[in-house]
Image (spheres, coloured by chain):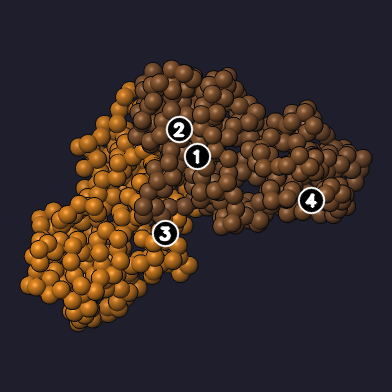
Chain colours: A brown, B orange
Amino acid sequence: MIEPQAKEMTGVELLTTIAATRKFVAAARQQGKSIGLVPTMGYLHEGHLTLARTAREQDDVVMMSIFVNPTQFGPGEDLERYPRDLERDRKLAAGAGVDAIFAPAVAEMYPPGYATYVQVEGLTEVLCGASRPGHFRGVATVVSKLLNIVQPDRAYFGLKDYQQAVVIKRLVRDLNFPVDIITVPTVREPDGLAMSSRNKYLAPDQRRSALALYRALNLGAELIRSGERRAAVVREAMAGEILARPGTRIDYVAVNDAETLAPLEEIKGRVLLALAVWVGNTRLIDNLTLEVKDDVAHHDEKQAAPGNCHRG
Amino acid sequence: MIEPQAKEMTGVELLTTIAATRKFVAAARQQGKSIGLVPTMGYLHEGHLTLARTAREQDDVVMMSIFVNPTQFGPGEDLERYPRDLERDRKLAAGAGVDAIFAPAVAEMYPPGYATYVQVEGLTEVLCGASRPGHFRGVATVVSKLLNIVQPDRAYFGLKDYQQAVVIKRLVRDLNFPVDIITVPTVREPDGLAMSSRNKYLAPDQRRSALALYRALNLGAELIRSGERRAAVVREAMAGEILARPGTRIDYVAVNDAETLAPLEEIKGRVLLALAVWVGNTRLIDNLTLEVKDDVAHHDEKQAAPGNCHRG
């Protein structure tokens, strides 16, 4: 299902079937090339493109999947209105060095009689997993499928979806997928708003209110750096910062262990500050990790990968 | 974790870690060799050895896994007493042309913090899935792990565990594992008892009672061939045959669709006759498939693979 015209235009091969993707990958493998996979739901932004550029540096062939995965959306969520624009994505992907896009139809990924799901327990019951039951089951399932279809050497995930990155690392470790998971720091707008395809939903006044997320995270980090160790106090301060903005509604404000994702009472070790906030009808998430060591909070330039030690 | 002495003795490499197995497999791949995997729980019998010989004919390298997988046993089942004899297995495997055995410890497969499970819905809720909740979740999980560790071209499963074969084919299709699943007909003792590691549990009188399973299956097939189309009548006749033997207790007697595994009322199409019977403290299973076409029951020499059309 290669469209040669489009390839000529953008330099990116468009694959819409699993069979064509396997063939493309097999040809690359035959030439001894390494393969990097950047799984996305499309409507690309700088965050996705940073993943692609990171893959471009490490792998001979960069594949991007673009698939708005229905099994990770709950009833009443934004599956239908989730923004899609494959032509735009293809041009952006080309600019970031992507060699091929795998953009299957839903029926290609979930044919009639589909019945198999992958569940990572524990880690998926908190934070977004608590608010969105079944979400991470859908994520773990589609990522398992993509890893089996593309068989990449490395797969790249952004840390804006911190819990997702932790869940996928656990999935890969537990089921022994032969792939390295590479996590990449959150990319932000100049004013600090984390890049998200869902930012498109925001009206100008909502866009202003959405800044509350990053401000609340920084306020939380500030409090911890200045010595506050009571998670409840930090959570309350963060919540106050968010609710001070018009049109916001809190889904969760969390101060959790960055490895186990379990809620903390006393702040110590690697700490995850994480937020999910409704701005109008749009649910936004953001997070920040920091390390509290010998009672000193470290807050580094680079956002930490789950399992590593720092952030920025 | 290769034990060279043992290899010299038997010609079979013994791998006990995932890392050593990946290394062994990578070396074979580098030489362009195809890999066949025979997953077992050990205590090998002719059924397993037939799988290995079938693999030997098709693949350059034959790997056998021997792992009594705890996640597919329920509470109170025979996990602890399940027979184990690795030295015996190694010699038998050598005789059947196995190149390497992967025999990991439980902690190698399920390290602390293990949290990921694979569930095939629907197909696993009937027959053995109904009697053994969680059993097929454990099977699908360990098979997913083994496929990722060994990355075989083909994996071989016996049709004595008919439902397992159907579940694994669905798992592989749904999650897009890059492997062909090959099913191999049930191997039987001269008197018809299906080979099983659990036959070892049977006392001589129980061994005689255990024949009831194969006789009941044949009686059921006989009735269908002679025109009976009411599944309830066939089930009842099969149950009668079993209960006529001392010390037997029925877990299930099923006349189901061989593809969907759904219970039948009227017998037509590809039909699965399946049994689970307690003989003393030992639970035995057996099955037989046949095709009812244009109102004629076909019953062939070769046992059908799920998705194929015949049996023997």
Mark 1 or mark 3: which is in front? 1
Query: Which residue position holds label 4?
Result: A247
Query: Which residue position holds label 1?
Result: A67
Query: Which residue position holds label 2?
Result: A102
Q: Callout 1: 10 Å neighbours few (<14), some, many (20+)?
A: some
For the N terminus of chain A, the quadrant is top left
Mark 4 or mark 1: which is in front? 4
In the displayed structure, would residue B179 be above or below residue A13? below
Label pair 1/2, CB-CB below 8 angstroms: yes
Front one among B14 and A229: A229
* Res. A189 image quadrant: top right
The verdict on a common chain for dots 2 and 4 is yes
Q: Which structural element holds mark 1?
A: loop
Q: Callout 4: 10 Å neighbours few (<14), some, many (20+)?
A: some
Residue in the picture at 43% in, 52% down: A116
Give the amino acid at mark 3. Glu
Q: Chain of mark 4?
A: A
Q: Chain of mark 3?
A: B
Give the amino acid at mark 4. Gly
Picture disc at residue B121: 3
Q: Callout 2: 10 Å neighbours few (<14), some, many (20+)?
A: many
How far apart marks 1 and 2 lie (CA) works out to 8 Å
The verdict on a common chain for dots 1 and 3 is no
Picture disc at residue B260: none
**Of all residues shown, which one is farthest toward the right?**
A226
